[in-house]
Amino acid sequence: MKKAITTTLALILTLSAVMNSASAAQTGDVSPDTASAQTTTDERVYCLASVSKVYVTAAVMQLVDQGLVDLDAPVTEYIPDFTMADPRYTQVTVRMLMNHTSGLMGSTAIDMFLYDDYDVDIHSILLNNLATQRLKADPGEYAAYCNDGFGLLQLIVENVSGMNFTDYITNELAGSIGLSHTGTPSNAYEIGNPIDVYVNNLPYDYEYCTDVGSGGVVATASDVAMFGSSFFTGSESLISQELVDEMELCWTDSDNEYLDGCGLGWDYVEMLQYEQAGVQIVGKGGDVLTMHSQLMVAPENEISVAVLSSGGSSTYCMLMCEALMNIALEEQGIEVQPLEPREVEIVDDMPEELEQYAGFYCCTSPMPGLGEVSFSDNGQMLLEITMFDGRTAEYHYRYTDCGGFVEVNDSGNIRANQTILFFEQGEDGQVYIASEQYTEVPEVGSYINNSYVAQRIEANPISDELQAVWEGYCAVPMAAYSDRYSSGVYDSPFEFMMMPDGLTGYVLAGTGLGARLLRIEDETTAVAIETMPCSSSRDLCDLYINDDGTASLTTGISYISLAAIPEFTSDITEVELTSDCASWYRIGDEMAYEMINVDCPEDAVIYVYNKFFEPVYTTHYLDAADSINLPEGGYIVFLGQTGESVTVS
């Protein structure tokens, strides 16, 4: 990733100028058109990932300003085709989509991230997938990050305005504030030169997020920072101040620090270290497979900072944003103090009543999987987590004077990146583990993340026969096979399932969006169980075993057992391709270490994986050779369009 990181650093060096021009544009020293013209024309275009959610929120807010959309009207009023297999869907409002309180399961994942391709009917994919789903919570009950809500917001913009989203973003949103380097996958090359992306340190096809409202807007860093300046107090260059204020309100007035703190479109509408300095901050971050982003705005101080990267993560982008924001605030005479971990002392006398919290937990952190909590003498707590691939990890904690358990190292000392866990009885009667996590990234910065991270679960008794059925499903890994030929899911297509020891009636499954503990309902169904009132309950899904032995998730992705795929042999000279149905083969002894040559159509892709399920070759590499060395015990998959074929020699 060296070249990608260099690109990111170059952006950082230009951002203080972007902040200054954005601030001047709002104070009358420079017009918005002039400020836009000051942005460099040789900047590269990035996918903004989930920062796109602020764009689609602003687009809907423009329609609210025009009296065409009511924030508290049901979504069905604007999308008549929106249905779900849960009658509560009619209670979902436009506002709930914006602040992640809709109760939707989370993310439709099929065909969402494509390489060098964006020609899919994502509206039909989203609506068809939602039509099969239940809600995970009552609409409005709590906020948990939800991508699908912003795909629906994009549909609202299109249905109400009568314009496709590319035209709306280009003309009505970006165009209204003088931004000429902002668009969607449909016009990415018209607005600028897309950034180079790398996978495994090799140049790769450019990635597009097809769900544009959720994560697919493309732009330069200067344009993003200028877009952020439209939310300065008193600007009204994009939407009215009343609606700017509405976006900046937290979804809840609760003082529970473990709940999500999102506004409308924004991930956060306050940050502790800035709040202590008397500065309001709103911001949004995002990640796709190869690109990452962060937009941070201080409305009253008229500072907007954007950091985009190829490689890295949105967390690194956030810390870079904070560093730049602090420099700009210092110029205004405001000093922001860095966050420090809570000061705690280890004590030996743990209250006996805490022992009632021993047992099994569905965990999302410090590692997703099945956790088992146990206590020993002197206030010691062990959290042992089993992951979906069968590996286990142990985390040790000691009781402290704050009533929580702090993680310790092998020497019994508090870890530098301090995590404190607290047990809490929820209003719903569930037992949750809340986490207060301080993390310092050397040379970059630090942050604190407070959230619920685990939920207590009890055994789900099932028959021996049903247990045996699911053990059979878990015996062999699965591979994704239903995504489009260009889908990024094939970068890491393998998933595992296992039946955890000591807890009956559950299956630990990889879902493509993280590992989940699912409760077995019958021979063909296992369902998500999380009710944690925060983003630990994001991206939930139910799993179904089909009559042909394949598995389907409510994310839209389907999987085939590796036991069901044929062997790749020397007499295979042509592989016929089928749209949305991958042609998988296992590499047996006959073809191990053999070299093959392939003639691949333009709209087709090949991947090769070793026996450890790691990709070792793909035609997505920009300099991929036509000759492929097949690894022992590995797998090869051919992807493309119906009517085409790959020639093998």
Image (cartoon, helix red, strand yellow):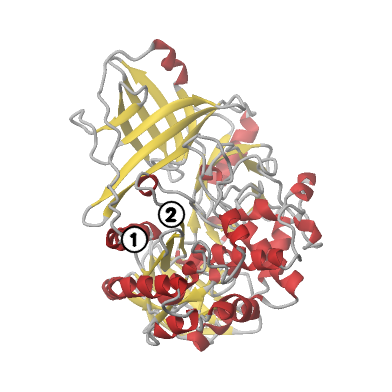
Circles 1 and 2: CB distance less than 8 Å?
A: yes
Q: Position of residue 586 (x, y in %)?
A: 48, 65
Q: Nearer the viewer, residue 582 or 312?
A: 312
Q: Position of residue 91 (x, y in %)?
A: 76, 47
How dense is the environment of label 1, judged by Cα within 10 Å: few (below 14), some, or many (20 and up)? many
Q: Is residue 4 above or below residue 502?
A: below
355 displayed left or right of 252: left
* In the image, farthest residue toward the left: 411
Q: Position of residue 303 (x, y in %)?
A: 40, 64
Q: Which mark is residue 281?
A: 2
Q: Quadrant of the N terminus?
A: bottom left
Q: Quadrant of the C terminus?
A: bottom left
Q: Is residue 572 visible?
A: no
State the SS at label 2: loop
89 displayed left or right of 247: right
Q: Which residue is mark 1?
A: 325
Q: Is residue 9 visible?
A: yes
Q: Nearer the viewer, residue 482 or 120?
A: 120
Q: Residue at x 38, y 36 (%)?
A: 436
Which residue type carries mark 1? Answer: Met
Q: Residue at x 63, y 68 (%)?
A: 59
Q: Nearer the viewer, residue 429 or 260?
A: 260
Quadrant assignment, res 139: top right
State the SS at label 1: helix
Q: Position of residue 447 (x, y in %)?
A: 33, 47
Q: Earlier in the sequence, mark 1 or mark 2?
A: 2
Which residue type carries mark 2? Answer: Ile
Q: Distance of mark 1 from mark 2, alpha carbons?
A: 10 Å
* In the image, farthest residue toward the top: 352
Q: Which mark is residue 30?
A: none
